[in-house]
Protein backbone atom coordinates (compact mmCIF):
# COMPACT_ATOMS: atom_id res chain seq x y z
CA UNK A 1 0.00 0.00 0.00
CA UNK A 2 2.88 2.39 0.83
CA UNK A 3 4.38 1.77 -2.60
CA UNK A 4 1.02 2.48 -4.26
CA UNK A 5 0.72 5.88 -2.58
CA UNK A 6 4.38 6.66 -3.26
CA UNK A 7 3.93 6.00 -6.98
CA UNK A 8 0.68 8.04 -6.96
CA UNK A 9 2.48 11.00 -5.36
CA UNK A 10 5.33 10.79 -7.87
CA UNK A 11 2.77 10.72 -10.72
CA UNK A 12 1.09 13.88 -9.41
CA UNK A 13 4.42 15.65 -8.87
CA UNK A 14 5.50 14.71 -12.38
CA UNK A 15 2.40 16.41 -13.78
CA UNK A 16 3.03 19.52 -11.68
CA UNK A 17 6.63 19.65 -12.93
CA UNK A 18 5.48 19.43 -16.56
CA UNK A 19 3.07 22.33 -16.01
CA UNK A 20 5.77 24.45 -14.42
CA UNK A 21 8.02 23.78 -17.41
CA UNK A 22 5.48 24.82 -20.03
CA UNK A 23 4.26 27.97 -18.28
CA UNK A 24 7.61 29.76 -18.07
CA UNK A 25 7.02 31.56 -21.40
CA UNK A 26 3.47 32.29 -22.51
CA UNK A 27 1.92 33.38 -25.77
CA UNK A 28 -1.64 34.25 -24.81
CA UNK A 29 -4.09 32.60 -27.23
CA UNK A 30 -7.07 32.08 -24.92
CA UNK A 31 -8.66 35.38 -23.93
CA UNK A 32 -11.94 36.36 -22.29
CA UNK A 33 -15.10 35.75 -24.28
CA UNK A 34 -15.75 33.22 -27.05
CA UNK A 35 -13.07 31.85 -29.33
CA UNK A 36 -11.47 28.91 -31.08
CA UNK A 37 -7.86 27.76 -31.24
CA UNK A 38 -6.46 24.85 -33.26
CA UNK A 39 -4.36 22.29 -31.41
CA UNK A 40 -1.71 20.12 -33.07
CA UNK A 41 0.68 19.91 -30.13
CA UNK A 42 0.52 16.18 -29.44
CA UNK A 43 3.16 14.73 -31.76
CA UNK A 44 1.70 11.25 -32.48
CA UNK A 45 -1.59 12.86 -33.61
CA UNK A 46 -0.26 16.15 -34.98
CA UNK A 47 -1.67 15.41 -38.44
CA UNK A 48 -5.18 15.22 -36.93
CA UNK A 49 -5.87 18.79 -35.75
CA UNK A 50 -8.36 19.49 -32.96
CA UNK A 51 -10.30 22.75 -32.82
CA UNK A 52 -10.73 23.90 -29.21
CA UNK A 53 -13.87 26.02 -28.86
CA UNK A 54 -13.89 27.96 -25.63
CA UNK A 55 -15.68 30.45 -23.44
CA UNK A 56 -13.97 32.43 -20.69
CA UNK A 57 -16.31 34.63 -18.60
CA UNK A 58 -15.60 38.33 -19.01
CA UNK A 59 -16.38 38.99 -15.34
CA UNK A 60 -13.86 36.83 -13.56
CA UNK A 61 -10.19 36.25 -12.88
CA UNK A 62 -8.71 33.85 -15.42
CA UNK A 63 -5.87 33.04 -13.06
CA UNK A 64 -8.19 31.41 -10.53
CA UNK A 65 -11.21 30.21 -12.53
CA UNK A 66 -11.80 26.42 -12.74
CA UNK A 67 -11.13 24.69 -16.07
CA UNK A 68 -13.81 22.41 -17.54
CA UNK A 69 -13.07 20.28 -20.60
CA UNK A 70 -16.39 19.39 -22.26
CA UNK A 71 -16.52 16.43 -24.65
CA UNK A 72 -19.14 16.69 -27.41
CA UNK A 73 -21.59 14.03 -28.59
CA UNK A 74 -21.73 11.98 -31.77
CA UNK A 75 -22.76 15.03 -33.84
CA UNK A 76 -19.25 16.41 -33.16
CA UNK A 77 -20.87 19.70 -32.15
CA UNK A 78 -18.23 21.11 -29.80
CA UNK A 79 -19.04 24.75 -30.56
CA UNK A 80 -22.76 24.27 -29.90
CA UNK A 81 -22.09 22.45 -26.62
CA UNK A 82 -19.71 25.17 -25.43
CA UNK A 83 -22.19 27.92 -26.36
CA UNK A 84 -25.03 26.08 -24.61
CA UNK A 85 -22.96 25.88 -21.40
CA UNK A 86 -21.79 29.51 -21.53
CA UNK A 87 -24.65 31.05 -19.49
CA UNK A 88 -24.06 28.71 -16.57
CA UNK A 89 -20.29 29.09 -17.01
CA UNK A 90 -20.65 32.88 -16.77
CA UNK A 91 -22.76 32.60 -13.63
CA UNK A 92 -20.40 30.12 -11.98
CA UNK A 93 -17.24 31.78 -13.34
CA UNK A 94 -15.95 28.62 -15.00
CA UNK A 95 -13.83 28.44 -18.16
CA UNK A 96 -15.23 25.93 -20.68
CA UNK A 97 -13.04 24.35 -23.37
CA UNK A 98 -14.64 21.98 -25.88
CA UNK A 99 -12.21 20.04 -28.12
CA UNK A 100 -13.77 18.97 -31.41
CA UNK A 101 -12.81 15.54 -32.74
CA UNK A 102 -13.87 15.94 -36.35
CA UNK A 103 -15.14 12.90 -38.24
CA UNK A 104 -12.63 13.85 -40.91
CA UNK A 105 -9.82 12.73 -38.61
CA UNK A 106 -11.43 10.67 -35.84
CA UNK A 107 -13.70 7.72 -36.59
CA UNK A 108 -16.26 6.41 -34.10
CA UNK A 109 -13.79 3.83 -32.68
CA UNK A 110 -11.17 6.59 -32.43
CA UNK A 111 -13.48 8.95 -30.52
CA UNK A 112 -16.20 7.10 -28.62
CA UNK A 113 -14.00 4.05 -28.06
CA UNK A 114 -10.91 6.27 -27.45
CA UNK A 115 -8.81 4.70 -30.20
CA UNK A 116 -7.11 1.88 -28.33
CA UNK A 117 -7.87 -0.55 -31.16
CA UNK A 118 -8.07 -0.21 -34.94
CA UNK A 119 -11.20 -0.76 -37.03
CA UNK A 120 -10.11 -4.41 -37.22
CA UNK A 121 -9.81 -4.61 -33.40
CA UNK A 122 -6.01 -4.70 -33.39
CA UNK A 123 -4.40 -2.98 -30.41
CA UNK A 124 -2.75 0.33 -31.34
CA UNK A 125 0.44 1.75 -29.87
CA UNK A 126 -0.41 3.51 -26.61
CA UNK A 127 0.92 6.82 -27.90
CA UNK A 128 -1.76 6.76 -30.64
CA UNK A 129 -4.72 6.30 -28.30
CA UNK A 130 -7.07 9.29 -28.39
CA UNK A 131 -7.11 9.43 -24.59
CA UNK A 132 -3.47 10.50 -24.72
CA UNK A 133 -4.27 13.87 -26.30
CA UNK A 134 -6.45 15.29 -23.48
CA UNK A 135 -3.74 16.07 -20.92
CA UNK A 136 -1.59 17.81 -23.58
CA UNK A 137 -4.64 19.91 -24.51
CA UNK A 138 -4.92 20.99 -20.86
CA UNK A 139 -1.20 21.78 -20.75
CA UNK A 140 -1.62 23.80 -23.95
CA UNK A 141 -4.52 25.77 -22.42
CA UNK A 142 -2.50 26.59 -19.31
CA UNK A 143 0.58 27.46 -21.39
CA UNK A 144 -1.39 29.88 -23.59
CA UNK A 145 -3.66 31.61 -21.10
CA UNK A 146 -3.32 33.46 -17.84
CA UNK A 147 -4.61 30.40 -15.96
CA UNK A 148 -2.77 29.05 -12.93
CA UNK A 149 -4.90 25.89 -12.89
CA UNK A 150 -3.21 22.64 -11.94
CA UNK A 151 -6.32 20.48 -12.36
CA UNK A 152 -9.28 20.26 -14.71
CA UNK A 153 -12.75 18.77 -14.56
CA UNK A 154 -13.91 16.54 -17.41
CA UNK A 155 -17.48 16.38 -18.72
CA UNK A 156 -19.07 14.40 -21.53
CA UNK A 157 -22.61 13.52 -22.60
CA UNK A 158 -23.76 10.73 -24.95
CA UNK A 159 -20.76 9.92 -27.20
CA UNK A 160 -18.82 12.31 -24.98
CA UNK A 161 -19.90 10.24 -21.98
CA UNK A 162 -18.59 7.16 -23.76
CA UNK A 163 -15.27 8.92 -24.24
CA UNK A 164 -15.06 10.15 -20.65
CA UNK A 165 -15.77 6.87 -18.89
CA UNK A 166 -13.26 5.03 -21.09
CA UNK A 167 -10.74 7.84 -20.59
CA UNK A 168 -11.08 7.37 -16.83
CA UNK A 169 -10.80 3.59 -17.16
CA UNK A 170 -7.77 3.52 -19.45
CA UNK A 171 -5.82 6.61 -18.40
CA UNK A 172 -4.48 7.83 -15.06
CA UNK A 173 -4.19 11.58 -15.51
CA UNK A 174 -2.22 13.64 -13.01
CA UNK A 175 -4.52 16.57 -13.80
CA UNK A 176 -8.12 15.32 -13.57
CA UNK A 177 -9.94 16.58 -10.50
CA UNK A 178 -13.22 14.78 -11.24
CA UNK A 179 -15.19 13.52 -14.22
CA UNK A 180 -18.89 13.61 -15.10
CA UNK A 181 -20.27 10.92 -17.42
CA UNK A 182 -23.61 11.88 -18.98
CA UNK A 183 -25.91 9.16 -20.38
CA UNK A 184 -23.65 7.16 -22.71
CA UNK A 185 -25.40 4.92 -25.21
CA UNK A 186 -23.44 1.94 -23.92
CA UNK A 187 -20.51 1.11 -21.68
CA UNK A 188 -17.23 -0.73 -21.34
CA UNK A 189 -17.47 -2.85 -18.21
CA UNK A 190 -14.34 -3.42 -16.10
CA UNK A 191 -14.89 -7.14 -16.68
CA UNK A 192 -11.94 -9.35 -17.60
CA UNK A 193 -14.19 -12.06 -19.09
CA UNK A 194 -15.75 -9.83 -21.79
CA UNK A 195 -13.81 -8.83 -24.90
CA UNK A 196 -13.27 -5.12 -25.59
CA UNK A 197 -15.14 -2.83 -26.23
CA UNK A 198 -17.80 -4.36 -23.97
CA UNK A 199 -15.27 -5.55 -21.39
CA UNK A 200 -11.51 -5.29 -20.92
CA UNK A 201 -10.42 -8.77 -21.99
CA UNK A 202 -7.60 -8.69 -24.57
CA UNK A 203 -6.48 -5.22 -23.45
CA UNK A 204 -3.56 -4.17 -21.21
CA UNK A 205 -6.15 -3.26 -18.56
CA UNK A 206 -7.45 -6.74 -17.73
CA UNK A 207 -6.11 -6.69 -14.19
CA UNK A 208 -7.23 -5.95 -10.65
CA UNK A 209 -5.09 -2.80 -10.31
CA UNK A 210 -6.86 -1.06 -13.21
CA UNK A 211 -10.31 -1.98 -11.92
CA UNK A 212 -9.59 -0.86 -8.36
CA UNK A 213 -8.21 2.47 -9.55
CA UNK A 214 -11.25 3.01 -11.78
CA UNK A 215 -13.67 2.46 -8.90
CA UNK A 216 -11.71 4.78 -6.62
CA UNK A 217 -11.74 7.79 -9.00
CA UNK A 218 -14.04 10.77 -8.48
CA UNK A 219 -16.60 10.07 -11.20
CA UNK A 220 -20.22 11.24 -11.37
CA UNK A 221 -22.67 9.29 -13.51
CA UNK A 222 -25.35 11.71 -14.74
CA UNK A 223 -28.59 10.22 -16.07
CA UNK A 224 -31.78 11.79 -17.42
CA UNK A 225 -34.77 9.77 -16.25
CA UNK A 226 -36.59 10.26 -19.57
CA UNK A 227 -33.61 9.10 -21.64
CA UNK A 228 -35.52 6.01 -22.69
CA UNK A 229 -36.02 6.39 -26.46
CA UNK A 230 -34.35 3.80 -28.68
CA UNK A 231 -33.33 5.98 -31.65
CA UNK A 232 -31.83 4.52 -34.79
CA UNK A 233 -28.32 5.56 -33.68
CA UNK A 234 -28.51 3.79 -30.30
CA UNK A 235 -26.21 0.79 -30.48
CA UNK A 236 -28.20 -2.43 -30.46
CA UNK A 237 -26.11 -5.60 -30.27
CA UNK A 238 -26.47 -8.73 -28.13
CA UNK A 239 -23.88 -7.24 -25.76
CA UNK A 240 -25.55 -3.84 -25.38
CA UNK A 241 -29.00 -5.39 -25.01
CA UNK A 242 -27.67 -7.16 -21.91
CA UNK A 243 -26.72 -3.73 -20.54
CA UNK A 244 -30.34 -2.52 -20.81
CA UNK A 245 -32.99 -1.51 -23.33
CA UNK A 246 -32.24 2.22 -23.23
CA UNK A 247 -29.65 4.68 -21.93
CA UNK A 248 -31.34 5.17 -18.59
CA UNK A 249 -31.53 1.42 -17.90
CA UNK A 250 -27.97 0.91 -19.10
CA UNK A 251 -26.68 3.64 -16.80
CA UNK A 252 -28.58 2.26 -13.81
CA UNK A 253 -27.25 -1.24 -14.47
CA UNK A 254 -23.68 -0.04 -15.00
CA UNK A 255 -23.63 1.87 -11.73
CA UNK A 256 -25.14 -1.08 -9.86
CA UNK A 257 -22.51 -3.40 -11.37
CA UNK A 258 -19.66 -1.14 -10.22
CA UNK A 259 -21.17 -0.67 -6.78
CA UNK A 260 -21.66 -4.42 -6.28
CA UNK A 261 -18.14 -5.11 -7.53
CA UNK A 262 -16.69 -2.71 -4.97
CA UNK A 263 -18.78 -4.14 -2.12
CA UNK A 264 -17.98 -7.74 -3.05
CA UNK A 265 -14.23 -7.10 -3.06
CA UNK A 266 -14.23 -4.49 -0.25
CA UNK A 267 -12.70 -1.93 -2.58
CA UNK A 268 -12.93 1.85 -2.31
CA UNK A 269 -15.82 3.27 -4.36
CA UNK A 270 -15.92 7.01 -5.09
CA UNK A 271 -18.48 7.04 -7.88
CA UNK A 272 -21.75 8.89 -7.35
CA UNK A 273 -24.95 8.81 -9.40
CA UNK A 274 -27.08 11.86 -10.15
CA UNK A 275 -30.47 11.57 -11.85
CA UNK A 276 -32.18 14.55 -13.44
CA UNK A 277 -35.97 14.07 -13.59
CA UNK A 278 -37.88 14.34 -16.88
CA UNK A 279 -34.87 15.03 -19.12
CA UNK A 280 -34.55 13.02 -22.37
CA UNK A 281 -31.42 12.56 -24.50
CA UNK A 282 -30.52 16.24 -24.80
CA UNK A 283 -26.79 17.05 -24.74
CA UNK A 284 -27.16 20.80 -24.40
CA UNK A 285 -29.73 20.65 -21.61
CA UNK A 286 -27.80 17.97 -19.75
CA UNK A 287 -24.60 19.96 -20.24
CA UNK A 288 -26.08 23.03 -18.57
CA UNK A 289 -27.39 20.95 -15.69
CA UNK A 290 -24.10 19.08 -15.40
CA UNK A 291 -22.03 22.27 -15.20
CA UNK A 292 -24.35 23.72 -12.57
CA UNK A 293 -24.08 20.52 -10.53
CA UNK A 294 -20.29 20.42 -10.70
CA UNK A 295 -19.94 24.01 -9.51
CA UNK A 296 -22.96 24.39 -7.23
Image (cartoon, rainbow, N blue to C red):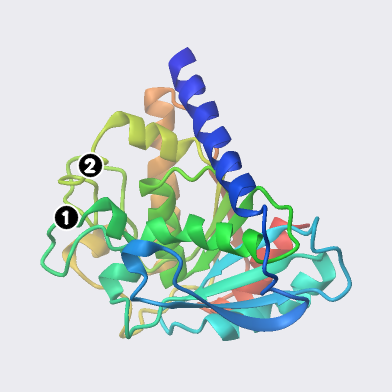
Are the residues tagged 1 and 2 within 8 Å (C-beta)? yes
Instruction: Evaluate whether residue 125 shows in this view.
Output: yes
Q: Is residue 125 above or below residue 234?
A: above
What element does badge 1 sit on?
A: loop
Task: State how far apart marks 1 and 2 are (Cα).
Answer: 9 Å
Q: Position of residue 197 (x, y in %)?
A: 23, 57
Name which residue lies at 33% across and 75% down.
47
Instruction: Evaluate whether residue 244 shows in this view.
Output: no
Quarter location, residue 207: top left
Instruction: Give the camera-side residue of 252 and 2.
Output: 2
What element does badge 2 sit on?
A: loop
* Dot 1 alpha-carbon crowd within 10 angstroms: few under 14, some 14 to 19, many 20 or more: some
Q: Which residue is mark 1?
A: 123
* Dot 2 alpha-carbon crowd within 10 angstroms: few under 14, some 14 to 19, many 20 or more: few
Q: Which residue is mark 2?
A: 204
Name which residue lies at 57% across and 84% down.
79
- N-terminal of the pair, mark 1 or mark 2, is 1
Instruction: Give the camera-side residue of 11 and 226.
Output: 11
Q: In the rendered view, does 57 fall on the left or right side of 218?
A: right
Q: Is residue 36 above or below residue 93?
A: below
Amino acid sequence: MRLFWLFSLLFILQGATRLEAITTKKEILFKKGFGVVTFTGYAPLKDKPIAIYYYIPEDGEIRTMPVLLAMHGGARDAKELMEAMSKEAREKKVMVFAPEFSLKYYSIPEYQEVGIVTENRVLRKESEWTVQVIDPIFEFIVAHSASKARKYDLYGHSAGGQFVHRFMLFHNSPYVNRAMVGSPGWYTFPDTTMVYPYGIKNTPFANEKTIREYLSKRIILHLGTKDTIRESFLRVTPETEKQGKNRYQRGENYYLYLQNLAVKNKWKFKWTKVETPDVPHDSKRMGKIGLSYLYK
